[in-house]
Image (cartoon, helix red, strand yellow):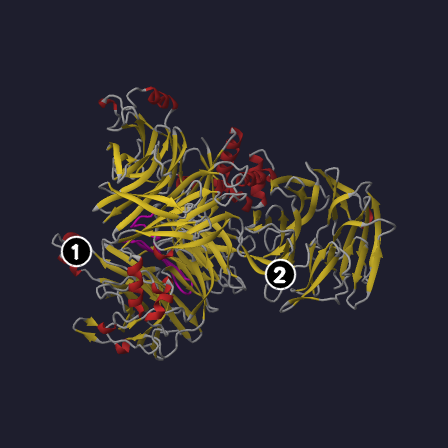
Amino acid sequence: MFLYNLTLQPGGSVSQAVYGDFSGGKQHEVVVARGKSLELLRPDEQGRVQSVCSVEAFGAVRQLARFRLHGTEKDLLACGSDSGRVSVLEYDADRAQFVKLHQETFGKSGCRRIVPGQMVATDPKGRACMLGALEKQKMVYVFNRDSSARVTISSPLEAHKSNTLCFDLCAVDNGFDNPIFAAIELDHAEVDADPTGAAARAAQKQLVYYELDLGLNHVTRQWADPVDNGANMVLAVPGGGDGPSGVIVCAENFVIYKHKGHADVRAVIPRREDLPPERGCLIVAGALHRQKGLFFFILQSEYGDLYKVSLVYDANDTVSEMRILYFDTIPTCISLCVFKNGHLFAASEFGNHAFYSFAGIGDEDNDVMSSSAQLTETDGGFEPVFFRPRPLKNLALLDEMESLCPVTAMKVENLHNEDTKQVYALCGRGHRSSLRVLRPGLSVAELARSPLPGTPTGVWTVRKSVDEAEDKYIVVSFTNGTLVLAVGDTVGEVSNSGLNNGVQTLLVQLLSDGSMLQVHAGGLRHVRTDGRLSEWAAPGRKRVSKVAANAAQVVVAMSGGELVYFELDTLGTLAEVERRDLAGDVAALDMPPLAEGSKRAAFLAVGAYDSTVRLFSLDPNQMFAPVATQAVPALPESVCLFPFQASANAPPTLFLNVGLANGVLLRAEVDPNSGDLSDPRTRFLGTRAPQLSRVVVRGRPALMALSARPWCGYSWQGRFQLAPLSYDALDAIAPFASGQCAEGIVATAGDELRILTLERLGEAFNSTTTPLPYTPRAMCHHPKHKTLVVVAADYRAPTAERRTQLRKEAVGGGGAEAAPMDTDGADGGADGGAAELLADDQLGEPRVEAGKWASCVRVLTSDGEETYTAALDEGEAALCACVVKFAGREEGTLLAVGTTTGLQWSPRRCAGGHVRLYRFADEGKQLELLHKTEVGGVVGAVCAFQGKLLVGVDSSLRLYDMGKKKLLRKCENRAIPSFVKTLHVQGERVYVGDAQESFHYVLYRAAENQLHVFADDLTPRYVTAAEYLDYDTLAGGDKFGNLFVLRLPAEMSGSVDEDPTGGSGAPGEGKLNGAPNKLECATMFHVGDVVTAVQRAELQPGGTQSLLYATVGGSLMAATPFERREEVDFFSHLEMHMRTAASPLLGNDHLQFRSKFAPVKDVIDGDLCEMYASLGPEKQRAIAEQLEATVGEVLKRLEARRELIV
């Protein structure tokens, strides 16, 4: 078995975000680290965050830090990773890629506690950086430039200190003085030597300054001062004339300003009224906003509350006061980035990431504020300052970036009876949990919809002039007339446009001199800028059947196959230039738009009824001379000459696109000089013949193909990408731009006119979201009624009734008597009655006492609409569920839910376990509890098996039948080593996934009523997900990020089936204290993220059945099997060459990464192979020659592999 692994949708989780100008030109951008990849994000004019570039690093990105060399105009990145190297990266806007400028090896690979790279801090002036490890080691590198202005790195300067833990690191801003780095450290030398624990209790954290002497080229430990033992974060304060310099230290309940030679300035962090006194408040994320004459910090606590921290200082840079203002509350974040233009990017810990604009900076008098000048010390400590959460006041949400992190369960089913299957994913944690219904395709936002007086035949837009960005008219054609709509603040019909409203329009085109051309069956109408009209009538009884035009040229095809060519002359007149009779009717016609600086297009594409597409020259010296012919397998219904531009500065490449009557799109490259066609590629789009049109996406030409559903072909990170739109079928389409919509699409569907816009490019799926109250644990669906059942549970979460009570107390003054608080408007006008109106993101997730669980069972329709919710008893956690049909019973399909009471995972223990049995009612929309059976342990998995129910209880596998008042235990096997995590069945076999000891194959003999373990694995694998492939084969994922396939050898499988003892054998025949037979590893592949769900399925009709799996980081991936050995050899050699040609960005070894825990076996990395398209032309040709293929053939094979999946 050989598999081809491919990422369908990258993970949405963010481990760090860094703000800067990485492209140059004063852009506002963010680089995010997504575990093992880097992505550059940039907000557009509408405030939507768009992905500009994404690259796989094939390694763990541990830390990012931006810096700018003095005198340059763009920011660079210093990256710490698990490669044991420090990397300096630059974003090349021309190539739309991250480029490795320099790389220096300093230690061993892997994420080790004594290997630097976990923390990276760069000097604000871009002169040096410090890399710190969690323990002992710190290294400083000096940045320089050589004679060619390329970045170089000096040899490392060591600043090691044994027996020292480092909690955080930053660079102090002290202008152009020697660079200084600040670290929060803890010396544990005496702790290790003291067995009594007294030294551990007396251990004290310190704030340490390290100075880099640029003259002497060495690092010294300049200053150390004790800080609170709760200190966890340090942020640099602007200096060098912009501020007092120094750092602020974030500790539990306090923020402290510290600097060498300066007294500490301390202020308490405002805390919620309902927060228990024993619980502290920690800062988890922070960002600095600075502009001329002003700076402040935005900090966030672990509860999601934002604070604005500002300093009051004098001309001598002496800080006299620190003020901490409650700012707003948003979901808890990993990173915060404050933009210079007044925006905030919040990379959430779980769920969607958010992009906000500042509506205020929190300078109102009634806002809750804590000041160091008002700090009051009492016998019990410093007096706290309280506030009440409120709706957003200083921030306004502009956009959300969808993230599936973490995916806890996944199902691929076609519950909507659509053309393609849907992916149902359970995502999130706590109150930010959700059910996502994913459909392949780009998401579309519908801006407007308006009825039309009939069914249109076409739609076009006309701009005010060639140089204008906005459209003037929308022209809609009907069989008996034409409707002209003027575009302004509103869209309305006009009659003075100059166009003929009484005929069916075939084409409307804006010409280069600002005049309009209307083509109809009777001829041409030329509307000049001064209002004069020119008409050209078709000769005799001939009628115009097809037309193609650009800003200077027009070609009409008349009945009978005669072509007439017109060209716009210098006087603004459309003059007839040439005619040609093709001796056959024309089925489709098109010419490319005018290239910048050219007077005419070079080629004309003509589709004929003899199933050919021909290219003719439009050169005046060789007018209508045939240059190329492409035979097609079906009638060409539509043709489009589309100039594809890989990047903003790349020259366009002309492609011939043909929509065939059988629903196939054919695409071939056109030689710009000779017109020869090469590298033809095909793709099935739907049951309708694709109708092709040109639109504009992100300022570049894009191709729209309207089939059974719309498709869009656009430039994405240097390559052409064709993706479906998740929208209804459309009949006609045209580009659209107005003051309210800078870049959109106007389309017709039936008798409606719609204005649409594409929300984000590069996404393989779009989703609809249904919120869930708790973390989802499992789901199943009713096979007949197709309703979904989701079980969810959270530790220390309140039940629904308790949650309502706590929410009222949070705003209703439940803690007012504990300490004074300014209630005059401090809560933004919220009272007890308004508490229920506040979103969970503003109130956070209330916590209850330890040992409590809140859980529920929800029934939802396939659209995500809730029809029933069953709340479980307090302390009872639902962990698994399945549908089961018991043999000989009249109840039909039932729902079994495994629950555990008083669950504690580490160490694992509980007060009891139960299996709840429910009956479906009201066509699967309601549940009725039949009975609840005590099982006496943690229920990890349930599964239907031969008319009975298999239940995994701790390390036991039990088989139950249904009784009147409870389930009846029929048999049990206690040979599972650790904990039953997954269950799958086929025939008489049961496939058990153990939480620590891989898979166990169990055979059930009905005659003996016994379960026998007949096969297991030699390697201990911590199974997190599993899927049945065939009678002898299972696929699974483990908690270390590996995807593997295990198989029972065929000869062993046959002997087990023939064994009359049921596979038990003699007691002494087990191998290595295990089963008598051992599984073999068929494939092994390190994904780099924990696999949480896996399923065998195909996403589209006619696609290849693949192994689809999701990860905790929110990525969706697929592993497809190869059918031919020749394909395996080709992609194996391509992967081998790509390991050298496209070495990982951060210095990792690709083969080592994919073999992190076990050698990679029989899996080809499709993500690495697809990077072939981003290589330079010379490298592409060199690799293609080694593969004995052309560049086009390699790209075609890569596209074909992806198209097999989605």
Q: Give the mark nearer the N terminus: 2 vs 1.
A: 1
In-front residue for pair 874/924:
924
Query: Where residue 713 appears, x then y in whole percent?
Result: 60, 49
- Where does label 2 land, which residue? 450
Query: Where residue 746 appears, x then y in whole percent?
Result: 63, 58
Q: Which residues are magenta?
A: 111-139
Q: Is residue 501 above or below residue 1168?
A: below
In-front residue for pair 1107/215:
1107
From the viewer's perspective, is 959 left or right of 349? left
For mark 1, does the 10 Å Cα neighbourhood hold few (<14), some (14 to 19), or many (20 or more) residues? Answer: some
Note whether residue 643 is visible: yes
Q: Amino acid at mark 2?
A: Ser
Q: Amino acid at mark 1?
A: Glu
From the viewer's perspective, is 548 left or right of 848? right
Give the structural element (helix, strand or loop) at label 2: strand
Residue at 83% from the left image edge and 61% from the top image edge: 534
